[in-house]
Image: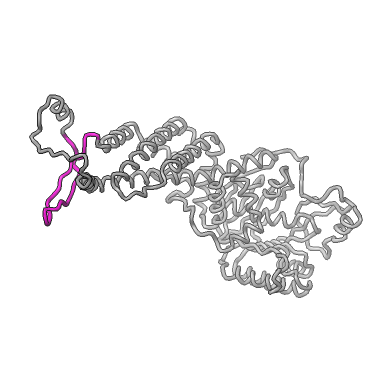
Amino acid sequence: MNVLLLHPDRDFAADAALPWNAPALAQDLALDVLIGAMAGGDPVVFEVSRQAILNAVNNDIQTILYRQAVLRDCLENPAVVRELYALAVEVLERKRARWFGFFTRYPAGILYEAIELLRMLLEMLRRLRRLADSHAGRFASAAFTALFSTIRSEVDDAWLESVRGHLKELRFRGGVLLSAELGEGNAGGNYVLRRDGRGARAWLSRLLGRSGGGYTFRLHPRDDAGARIVSEIRDAGINRVANALAQSAEHVLNFFVQLRTELAFYIGCLNLRDRLSAAGEPLCFPVPAPAGTRRLRFDGLYDACLSLTMGRRVVGNAADADGRDLVVITGANQGGKSVFLRSIGLAQLMMQCGMFVPAASFEAEICTGLFTHWRREEDPTMKHGKLDEELARMSEIADHLAPDAMVLFNESFAATNDREGSEIAGQIVAALLEKRVRVFFVTHLHEFPRRMFERAAGGALFLRAERLPDGTRTFRVVPGEPLLTSYAEDVYRAVFQGEGADEPPDASEPSNPAPAAP
């Protein structure tokens, strides 16, 4: 049986290689906060969610919509999904507590362990079938419908009883019936296990003292060599059966392993929904568009990691960047520009791995790759200057770029003077746009955004962190041409003169009403 809850045509590979820039994505987008909230302390959920999110750009639209349908079922039936996951976890915990693997090399030991493991697995399959019988009608997605249908058809009462009977027979309570041939030196060979067809008649004959006409020999209680030879003959006969049964047990066990793995992703989504909904945050299912269509519009988009850290609702933003290859964000210091950029990256990854996104509405094209270029701290080894390090990282990103990729720049190339930094940023952005790479650029540089504003015409969107006339940051990003100031004097007054010190900027918005989550 296949689970197929994350892909319509194959199992989810929990051990697939992560993208080369996974550490940078995790650091720049604060993914450990998001994935930690999804895991809720469960290491399996953490690893599966991490794998799914970081490899999200490998999914096509069909896979995204497939997972969205499954996730809708999970959100409608969270108790059933958690019960299915708990059942799969219980199977593996019971196996781990009793069976560490078929390490013995003796067929008799392998057979015994396989029988005991399959007895436990049959009990769990019976419970799984009862769950499918009770709740299948409440699920509408193609994935859950197929999974429950397979369980109900293949794990029916007749099959369960048949397997139980085979396991009882394989205990060989009445001995083992073998056939063999004599080889060189009268050594036995070609041992074949035979089914004992004597049944009730043989039992009745033994009870009445009638002989079946065969030959019998008995070992002396102290004949250790003879006992060893008989044991070897028995093992030779049951070897193939023992191996086949062990493989069958592993096959059933692997089904539960895969069920736990694929359900773990949706358990993470349920945990995240619960955390964000408790903070009053909106969630929505995004609308993915084909790569290259340059679709991006959203309303109420917020940084889920900031909300999770603060435990309350944060400011959301709206924008329409349809048809735009370049989005430049400027404006006041501590005005929410970096938070806004992070919310873009998080939403893109969450959409492409089939999740809901932290917004009231979100529609975007899928990208062929997501890359981040954040400002870093000074190299503690003093081997490279900050600008050298930035350019080296940019060169590495360029080696992995493809058309319709997305690059997020956060205060990049500001380690030198404004004129030189603007020239570097302008040339890099121009080269990326020429190769059909979508660019989002948060900057405090003055000359670079002004150049882009003059040259980009309708191909770019310029946003600005909002600042009220009294210096208040609303933490909203609104359309606006770049200015020649970032209002650093506001930060200076707050830090050194105490103005506004009682209300540090945190992008929080606790007074807003809480929209319904999906």
Residue 476 visible in the snapshot? yes
Residue 142 visible in the snapshot? no
Q: Is residue 494 left or right of residue 302?
A: right
The residue depicted at 56 percent of the width and 66 percent of the height is 402
The residue depicted at 49 percent of the width and 57 percent of the height is 16
- Farthest front residue? 222
Front residue of this view, candidates 449 and 407: 407
Above or below, 290 relative to 221: below
Q: Position of residue 399 (x, y in %)?
A: 57, 70
Q: Position of residue 248 (x, y in %)?
A: 33, 44
The residue depicted at 37 percent of the width and 40 percent of the height is 117
Q: Is 55 part of what is drawn in magenta?
A: no
Range shown magenta: 173-197
- Farthest left residue? 213
Q: Position of residue 146 (x, y in %)?
A: 42, 41
Q: Is residue 248 left or right of residue 402?
A: left
Q: Position of residue 468 (x, y in %)?
A: 85, 52
Image quarter for residue 393?
bottom right
